[in-house]
Image (cartoon, rainbow, N blue to C red):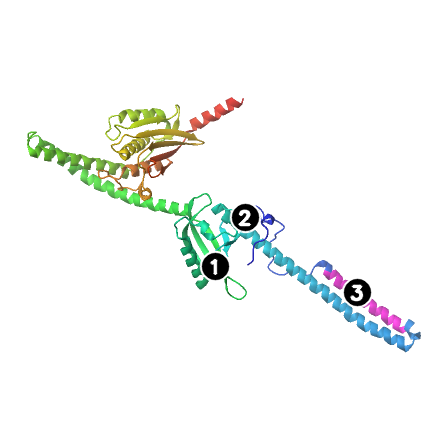
Amino acid sequence: MATLPDRAAAPPLGTALPESIPVPPAAGRPLFRREAFLLLFCAAFACLLFVLWTWIEREPLARVPDESRAFLRNLQGLLAPFLAAYVAARVYSAMVARDERELQRHRLLLAHILDTSIDGILTLDPDDRVSTWNRGAEQIFGWSEEEILGKHASVLYPPGYGAQRELDALRRGTDQRGVLRAHSGERITRDGRHIRCEISSTVLRDAQGRYAGRASIVRDVTERDRIREELNRRESLAAIGEMAAAVAHEIKNPLAGIGGAVQVLGRGFKAEDPRAEVVQEIQRQVRRLDETIRDLLTFARPPRPRPAPLDLKELCERILRALAEEPDLKGHRIELVVPHGTLVRADPQLLENILVNLLLNAGQALGTRSGRIRVGATDQADKTLITVADDGPGIPEDVLPRLFKPFFTTRAQGTGLGLAVVHKFVLAMGGRIEVKTGPGQGATFVVVLPRPKEALEAERGGARGGTA
């Protein structure tokens, strides 16, 4: 099976095509100048020889015996074909050399294109072992050519993914159809990251037409799929938001009337009357519905953030004072690890809503057992990382993909809108939210927000003052 030329001869990824690998012309080149000159020289020499021989035959050879003259005539008859054969051989060798050079240029150009492609291009032998590996594949998977050549292609699959089953299916598909387009699948990089790939394969055959492996073009579409899912999610959220706002407005006023009527009815029952307990339960359920409607309106209402420089420690202290008597947080130890002077660029009301929801979520995850909740902040370059972590049971892996979806909850009394509102508010302020968790390792929510210019300028001013 053909392999690419030596990688040391290929230019670095992203560079312009070097002069040593010119684009081959559409038509063949003319004969080289030296060969044309040689052809003209031989033709001139033949003409000169003919003229000289004519003169010799008339003058000097007139006195030469007939036997010697016949020998010279035979020599002249042999010299002309020899000269013509010599010229033809030189012209043919020049054409062969030209074609070989053109072929070499084509090969080097092809090798350069393959090696500098941003897509991964690799070939597998009939045993599914990697036989060639370009720099695009190295950038996608992290394996260098020296590390991956000869290894079985199953090293590119996540554990438990069924690598051999999929490899067999790909082999059968390419062998039967000759080509397999846009096959999607999950792969794993050298450092353990799971990525989504789109793969197109073509069959390779030997001179006898037997299956000799396949060539594959691999494209990392993880980010593309993430953006597509995010767009779909936002579209669905917008539709849900419109519906929720309409429903909430239709229910809110009648619900307020029901609550008021029940409260009036409750005044007519004594405390020991069994009907008083029923009325109290109705009032609790009305309050619960009212809270759900408020959450719906909060979620459906498009946030209009007014970001401004904000002292994060001061805001956190105010929130913790307000939540001191919150039942979900009582009995838990709350640690505030936010450095003085930590500034973020955020809307105060939106950020307060985010932190309150995350704190209540952490308290509900801990339940009745005593636990610890830690609120921290770290500055990194032009952004601030705000963390709310608990030491609870953690979030199951199957729950993570649906964690920020509206109306999804694992609690019987939950509305499923708290984290959806948090996610919406964080995005509205130009940030993002991440979750780190594991079985029995608790959960850590990381809110990433931009730092205000004042903090960055103060930091740069301090750095200049320190080096002065």
Label ID, residue 146: 2
Q: Which residue is mark 3?
A: 44
Q: Residue at x 34, y 46 (%)?
A: 232
User: Within 10 Å of the Cα at label 2, are there few (<14), some (14-19), or many (20+) other Cα atoms?
Assistant: few
Which quadrant would residue 383 be assigned to in this image?
Answer: top left
Residues shaded magenta: 35-58
User: Within 10 Å of the Cα at label 1, are there few (<14), some (14-19), or many (20+) other Cα atoms?
Assistant: many
Q: Residue furthest bottom?
A: 66
Where residue 68 sits in the image (x, y, percent)? 89, 75
Residue type, label 1: Thr
Q: Which residue is mark 1?
A: 202
Q: Nearer the viewer, mark 1 or mark 2?
A: 2
Where residue 116 sits in the image (x, y, percent)? 54, 49
Where residue 426 sits in the image (x, y, percent)? 35, 36
Which residue is at the front of the view, 464 or 107? 107
> Quick check: 142 above or below 460?
below
The residues tagged by marks 1 and 3 sit, at their Cα atoms, a distance apart of 56 Å
